[in-house]
Image (cartoon, rainbow, N blue to C red):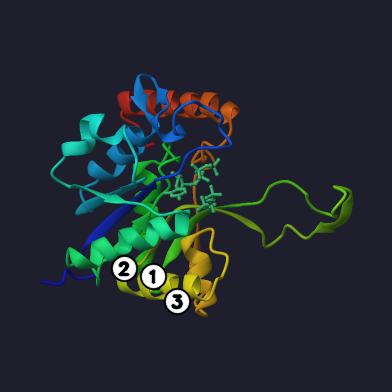
Amino acid sequence: MSQSLDHVVAIIPAAGVGQRMGANIPKQYLEIDGISILSHTVKAFLNHPKVDVVIVAVSKDDQYFDQLPESNHSKLVKVQGGSERANTVLESLKSASQLGYEDSWALVHDAARPCITRRDIDLLLKSRENYPNGAILAMPVRDTMKRADSSSLIKNTVCRELLWHAMTPQMFVVSELQKNLNEALNDNVLITDESSAMEWAGINPGLISGRADNIKVTHAEDLQLAALYLSEHKKNEIQGENS
Ligand SMILES: Nc1ccn([C@@H]2O[C@H](COP(=O)(O)OP(=O)(O)OP(=O)(O)O)[C@@H](O)[C@H]2O)c(=O)n1
Ligand SMILES: C[C@](O)(CO)[C@H](O)COP(=O)(O)O
């Protein structure tokens, strides 16, 4: 039975190796405050009342996920990821469709972004009223932006007025994203986020301004920053603030 647009599927791509982190395990399994990055991320969606199911995509030789306390949660479905992030997301979308969620909203969120807050998830979900074709969390660029030449010399300054940093979650209807992502990949289009597949299909998703602390843990120094942000969120929750 097909679920309606009232339903929400969280998709957590977690099949990367974390090469830029340079750790001896995939970065999503590094711990902050005794809890893995992936667990921090997954819990934000497992605990959200509007999320019906959380699909976590791990690599085919993953040896860590099943040890996580959340791995046997009733709302969680584990699937196998692919060679690139986009392939992982496509496999997850196929699973969502097979589970009957083809007509539901997908929230695709990087496992490597553990600082996501309830506030930002709600902000994106609320944007469905204004952006029926989907939207993404993003942050306006604050720095002056330079384009480099092949020798890493400044070629020119890029007008930053309309530039945003794309973040996640990125929110689209499962069947629409699955169709467009599949076709874009078949056309060998470089897809680094879900929105770029929708844009390739001629759709202009909405930009929802999100928190700057929704960082993607990519390099070693990001780990300390994520730990600081998570500690602050925990304090706010303790003080009852809606972080
Ligand atoms: N084949 C892949 C590659 C990446 N990801 C996920 O996509 C998210 C964002 O990707 P990135 O930060 O680049 O993670 P890695 O690919 O692991 O990092 P690196 O590029 O440094 O190897 C991560 O949660 C990662 O686990 C995935 O599910 N499947
Ligand atoms: C999806 C994303 O986080 C949006 O900024 C980003 O494109 C992921 O890139 P990565 O190279 O796969 O980390």
Under 8 Å from ligand 2: the CB of mark 1? no
Name the residue located 40 percent from the left edge and 50 percent from the top edge: 109
> Where residue 81 sits: x, y (%)?
36, 52
> Where residue 203 sits: x, y (%)?
49, 77
Residue underneath mark 1: 177
Label 2: state its secondary structure: helix
Q: Earlier in the sequence, mark 3 or mark 1?
A: 1
Residue placed most toward the observer, 47 or 186: 186
Say which quadrant the N terminus sits in.
Answer: bottom left
Residue underneath mark 2: 174
Under 8 Å from ligand 2: the CB of mark 3? no
Q: Is residue 224 left or right of residue 48?
A: right
Label 1: state its secondary structure: helix
172 in relation to 111, above or below: below
Which mark lies nearer to you, 3 or 1? 3
Query: How many neighbours does mark 1 have within 10 angstroms: few (below 14), some (14-19), or many (20 or more)?
Result: many
Label 3: state its secondary structure: helix
Name the residue located 41 percent from the left edge and 70 percent from the top edge: 130
**Residue 102 picture quarter:** bottom left
What's under tag 3, amino acid-wise?
A: Glu
